[in-house]
Image (cartoon, helix red, strand yellow):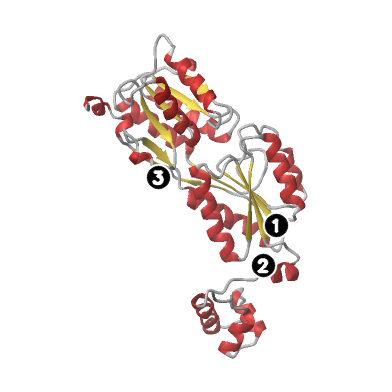
Amino acid sequence: MYEAITIKDIAKALSLSTSTVSRALRGSYEISPETKKLVLEYAEKFNYRPNPIALSLKERRSRSIGVVVTEIANNFFSQAINGIESIAYNRGYHVIISQSHESYEREIVNVQHLSSRSVDGLLVSLSTETVNTDHFKNLHEKGLPIVFFDRIAEGIDTHKVIVDNYKGAYEATDNLIKSGFKKIAHLTSSSHLSITKERLAGYKDALLKNNLPVDEAYIKYCNHGGMITAEVEDAVKELMNLKQKPDAIFAASDRVTISCLSTFKTLGLSVPNDIAIIGFTNSGLIELLNPSLSAVKQPAFEMGQMATELLIQLIESKRPVTQFETRVLQTELTIRESSTKTAKKKK
């Protein structure tokens, strides 16, 4: 196993001073383009990585980023974390990950723990139970850099990275309608989440623009985002006990989608013979399901990368940042057998 090279090693190999190498690695204007190129190419060739301990002592920063998500096992969040780490480690930051498991209380404990460890900033996706965001507001007002992604806190003025939830939901619902389904239910997470509001709006508008009514009996909220299977099971049972049973479901999150499919199996419902479904999921296994699952996919890895870049900009800014932005990434709808009427003919 090779030992990591240091700035001193690079300086010795290239016959430069350590200060010159250090400034070249930081991109200082004081160093000529030729020298920068020489140093950066050597650093890349021998896999140089900044020493977080040395940097933290010099800059009085911990060189660590706290990440607050609901569940690492969720396909979306595991991919987002990969994106976060791909940027953070290359910039000399460690990543400390915590899971709220959709609990407001646990989210507060996690945030207090991370801030007590003097992380340089937080990347946050809210739990389904979180309505009050004072625990984030207080830290934000004290100057701790925070960037929200996916499930955002609308009342805190900072950088945010989301997907076009409205468009993703609209396209999924519109596709079900154009495939011949007219009684489309919507299974979603807690009503106060930003993603829930945006996806619900897309679902409703797709119905209205296709001259179909919005029936509130067809809209079911799962307050723990599908983590508790019984919640989803009860919602599906209620839908299937309606006098006018739905012929399709648009499921609005990864966990809700997977729990919904599990419930169909438990109840003996055949997809799409008894009911069609399009879900929001980033699972790599959906093509292997029988039937294969139609789904809206989010660019989770890119979202993690973008959120991390914005957070590091806040951390390393020389002056207080007052201009913030919300970046919107696009979703991708892939149609498979679970929402296709022709699949009903297959035996």
The amino acid pointed to by label 2 is Pro
Disc 1 and disc 2: Cα gap in Å? 12 Å
- Where is residue 304? Give x, y as percent: 54, 51
Mark 3 and mark 1 lie on one chain; the one further toward the N terminus is 1
The image quadrant of residue 211 is top left
* Quadrant housing the N terminus: bottom right
The amino acid pointed to by label 1 is Asp
Which is nearer the eye, 93 or 312? 93
Question: How many marks can you see?
Answer: 3
Name the mark nearer the viewer: 1 or 2. 2
Give me the residue at 34% from left, 40% from top.
288
Q: Residues within 10 Å of mark 3 (few under 14, many from 20)?
A: few
Mark 1 and mark 2 lie on one chain; the one further toward the N terminus is 2
The answer to whether residue 260 is above or below residue 21 is: above
Kindly give the residue lying farthest to the front in the view shown: 1
Q: Is residue 107 left or right of residue 33?
A: right
Q: Which residue is mark 2?
A: 52
The image quadrant of residue 243 is top left
* Quadrant housing the C terminus: top left
Q: Which mark is residue 120?
A: 1
Q: Is residue 151 left or right of residue 61?
A: left
